[in-house]
Every structure is written in C-alpha cells, then in structure tokens.
Image: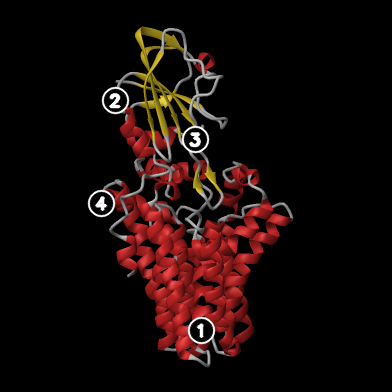
C-alpha cells in the first residue's frame, strides 16, 4: 500500500521552489555543493550529499530525485511496523503500518526531494534502537541509537527534539552504564559541531519567510496537518471525522500508556511538537509542520498501541479502518486536484513554449530557480534587453488548507509596454501565462515593466536567451 501510494505518482507533480534548490545543488560539483548548502539551505548537508551521489547514478528528473525520499518513506513504514511490534504486538503493528502507509503527511514528504523523509526515517529508526536497548540492554542497540541519532541530527536539526528526550530516558534508566554516557556524549558532540553551520544558516535568514505567516495560525494547523497534510478538499469534514476516529480508536486503551516503550515514544513525539512551538513563542521562530515531521511516527505508534489495547477489538479495528479510509480519500483527492498539489512550474514552462529570446515578468519573485528547472537560458534581467517577445506568468499564493488560489486576470492598472499587444493567454486552476508580442524588437528594462504583472504579490523580471 505504501509503495502504491508513493511510487507511481512520483513524477506527476512539478518540482516546486524548495525542490528546485535541491536540483540546483545536485547539478553543482561536489565541492561547490558543499560550499553552497550554508548559503541556500536551513538544514545540515547529509541529505544533499546522498542526493548528489544519487543523481549521478539515476539522473535528476523529478521522478529520480524523489525516488530517494520515497524509498526512505517506504523504509519508515517498515520501521514503524517493527517499532509497534516491539512495543505492543502484532495487532498494534498492523494498525501502525496501515496508518503510516497512507498518512497524507508522510505520503506528501515521501514525494518531495528534500531532507524531511530521510530525517524522519533516521529519527524513527533511532527510537526503535532506543526501545530495543531499554528492553534488553544489547550493546548493538545502543550503538545503533548513537549512529542513527548522529546521522539524524546531521540530516535535519529538528531530529534533536527526538534525540534529547531519548537521551534522558537512557540516562535515567541506565545512569551507571558507561556505554550509555559514551553514546550520549558522541551524539552531543555531533550536535555541537553543527552549531556554527546552524548559526550561519539562521543568520542568512533562510526561514524568515515564516514570520510572514501568523504564528497562531501555524500552531493551530499543526495537529490538522499531522492528520491530513497541508491542503485537501473538505478539510473541516475530513478533519473532524479523522479526529473522532482517532479518539475512538485510541482513548479506550489509554491504560496501555504504562507499557514498556510507550512513554519514551510519547515523550519524544510531544517534545518534538511542543519544543519548537515554545521556541517560536519566545522569538526563535522556525515553526513549520514539515520541520516537526519526525514527531509523527512515534505519535502514530502510540495511537496504534492504545487502539490495540482497547477492550473492543471490533470497535478499534473499525475506527482504524475508517481513519485509513479518510487518509486514502485525502491522498487520492490531492492526486486528482491540481490546486492541492505543488506549484506547477512545469506547466508554466510548457505554456511558454520553446526556448527563445524573451523577457518574462514572473510572480512570485522566487520564480528564477523553478523556471531554470524547466527552461534553459533563464537569468534575472538586470539591464536593458531588446526583444519582441514578452511573457507574463503568475502562480498564485497558497491559501492555508485550501491550496493554490485562482490566478488573476489583467486589472485596469495592467499596461503593456509601447509596441506590445496581448496576443494570447492561458489560464488554468493554478497558473496564468500571458503572451505579449511586438512587430519589432523593443528595449525593455525592469523599470519599464512594473505595470506588467498579474496580481498584487511580489514579482521578478527574467530574461531568456535563445
């Protein structure tokens, strides 16, 4: 089920802005890629190293780039199953595996060429190693926890919010064990070594865009996005239904919280969720559900354990089955509805047509890298350019929970440059492309094109060579 929901549609959606950064990095030389990560990214380099190697083996198409996180997503489902099996038994493992296979948030990031899926796998695998060590004390489990935790933090800083409560459990349970102290110190050393890189990336302001979104809205969206992902149809109905089914499945088994392994998982999931919220409230605002993704597997396992422990097996099975049905509906609706998918820069490129000498007025102002992913010869226009081809493109902003807004039509303020006339337009549910042409070349500059854009969002002026 996990493979069927992830693999066949890997290349269906266009690469969007964040993924275009990944594409840009893997097309560089290895040394240039490592040097560029601090300038463009907000995460450590492990994922980009793997993606760079992966692209040399399998190419850099959307399908190829996303196959790496998709395989990590499939492995996460397997680890979640084994983790629930270790904590509670086969029934809980089946529940956890089914929910993980079709959870919209996990499916979404299994299909995104970024570090989130790999970080979630490493965090989840480290929790499995933690539970194994707490249960039987094997040195191999502790070594696994140490290695997986260190790799996880070196993939995404927020894995630390999984690792820290796990380290507390280790020290509390086996305070006198020198092996535990050595493992915790080794992981802490990796975290400390990453602080200069994290400080550089934070100072660069890569996450400053988050402050433009109301913090209260982002906090309120976290539980909904854990259940349903970012955007899908009928979210009020499906959200309420999913919450009721989850409560109906897990609350009757609440006494199972005392079981070995459940409390460490619950504490890891809660810390990874609540600590970033508290940091945002005091001014260190990096709160976005994608950064909290490592919290989803342990919370999902806890819910599955409680569901399996309920007094009525039939009722819990029906609730879990109903929740899976809601998840499947959301996932299939996203696949069928472009407005709930990633920004369609590939569609925009197709609407522009073959490469030629042209000027492009593009909204939003982050269009450069996504356009470069699908059109050669695209650069930022910094001076005058003589051309008879002018195109205006717009991908409207995402609306919280509602997907992409409808594209704008030219307003009364829309003024083509002298000599240009609108000769064609293409509107879809997610983008607009206007074609303006002149009978003879006209010198265009960024300053002369301020009235040639769609919508009120920020824009950039691009140039394309033949």
Q: Secondary structure at mark 1?
A: helix
Q: Nearer the viewer, residue 27 or 314?
A: 314
Give the residue drawn at x 52%, y 59%.
Answer: 235
Q: Position of residue 254 (x, y in %)?
A: 60, 86
Tag 1 residue: 307
* Front label number (2 vs 4): 2
> Are dots 4 and 3 in contact, CB under 8 Å?
no
Q: Quadrant of the C terminus?
A: top left
Tag 2 residue: 355
Disc 1 or 4, which lies upstream in sequence?
A: 4
Q: Position of residue 354 (x, y in %)?
A: 27, 27
Q: In 3D space, how far apart are the residues under numbered discs 1 and 4 (Cα atoms)?
A: 41 Å
**Disc number for residue 58:** 4
Q: Position of residue 6 (x, y in %)?
A: 34, 61
Task: Specify the color scheme.
Answer: secondary structure
Extreme-right residue of the structure: 282
Disc 2 or 4, which lies upstream in sequence?
A: 4
Q: Is residue 277 above or below residue 373?
A: below
Residue 248 in sight in this render: yes
Q: In 3D space, how far apart are the residues under numbered discs 2 and 4 (Cα atoms)?
A: 26 Å
Give the residue drawn at x 54%, y 30%.
Answer: 455
Q: Secondary structure at mark 2?
A: loop
Q: Secondary structure at mark 3?
A: loop
Q: Quadrant of the N terminus?
A: bottom left
Disc 4 or 3, which lies upstream in sequence?
A: 4
* Front label number (2 vs 1): 1
């Amino acid at each position: 089920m996990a493979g069927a929901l992830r693999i066949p549609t890997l290349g269906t959606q266009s690469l969007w802005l964040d993924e275009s950064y990944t594409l840009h990095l893997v097309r560089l030389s290895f040394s240039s890629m490592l040097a560029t990560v601090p300038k463009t990214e907000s995460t450590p380099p492990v994922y980009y190293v793997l993606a760079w190697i992966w692209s040399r083996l399998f190419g850099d198409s959307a399908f190829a780039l996303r196959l790496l996180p998709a395989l990590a997503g499939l492995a996460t489902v397997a680890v979640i199953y084994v983790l629930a099996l270790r904590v509670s038994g086969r029934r809980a493992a089946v529940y956890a595996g089914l929910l993980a296979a079709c959870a919209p948030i996990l499916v979404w990031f299994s299909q995104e060429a970024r570090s989130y899926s790999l970080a979630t796998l490493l965090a989840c695998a480290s929790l499995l190693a933690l539970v194994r060590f707490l249960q039987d004390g094997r040195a191999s489990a502790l070594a696994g926890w140490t290695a997986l935790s260190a790799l996880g933090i070196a993939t995404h800083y927020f894995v630390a919010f999984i690792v820290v409560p796990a380290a507390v459990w280790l020290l509390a349970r086996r305070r006198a064990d020198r092996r535990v102290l050595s493992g915790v110190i080794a992981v802490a050393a990796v975290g400390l070594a990453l602080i200069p890189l994290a400080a550089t990336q934070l100072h660069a302001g890569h996450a400053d865009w988050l402050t433009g979104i109301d913090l209260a809205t982002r906090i309120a969206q976290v539980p909904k996005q854990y259940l349903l992902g970012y955007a899908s149809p009928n979210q009020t109905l499906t959200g309420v239904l999913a919450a009721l089914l989850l409560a109906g499945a897990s609350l009757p088994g609440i006494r199972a919280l005392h079981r070995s392994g459940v409390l460490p998982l619950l504490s890891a999931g809660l810390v990874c969720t609540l600590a970033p919220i508290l940091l945002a409230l005091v001014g260190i605002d990096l709160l976005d559900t994608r950064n909290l993704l490592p919290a989803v597997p342990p919370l999902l396992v806890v819910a599955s354990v409680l569901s399996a422990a309920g007094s009525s097996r039939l009722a819990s099975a029906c609730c879990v089955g109903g929740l899976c049905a809601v998840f499947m509906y959301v996932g299939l609706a996203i696949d069928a509805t472009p407005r709930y998918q990633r920004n369609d820069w590939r569609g925009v490129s197709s609407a522009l047509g073959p490469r030629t000498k042209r000027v492009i007025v593009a909204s939003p102002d982050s269009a450069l890298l996504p356009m470069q992913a699908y059109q050669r010869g695209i650069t930022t226009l910094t001076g005058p350019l003589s051309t008879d081809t002018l195109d205006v493109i717009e991908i409207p902003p995402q609306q919280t929970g509602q997907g992409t807004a409808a594209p704008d039509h030219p307003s009364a303020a829309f003024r083509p440059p002298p000599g240009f006339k609108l000769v064609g337009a293409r509107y879809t549910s997610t983008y607009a492309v206007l074609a303006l042409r002149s009978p003879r070349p006209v010198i265009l500059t960024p300053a002369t094109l301020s009235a040639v854009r769609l919508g009120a969002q920020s824009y950039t002026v691009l140039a394309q060579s033949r």
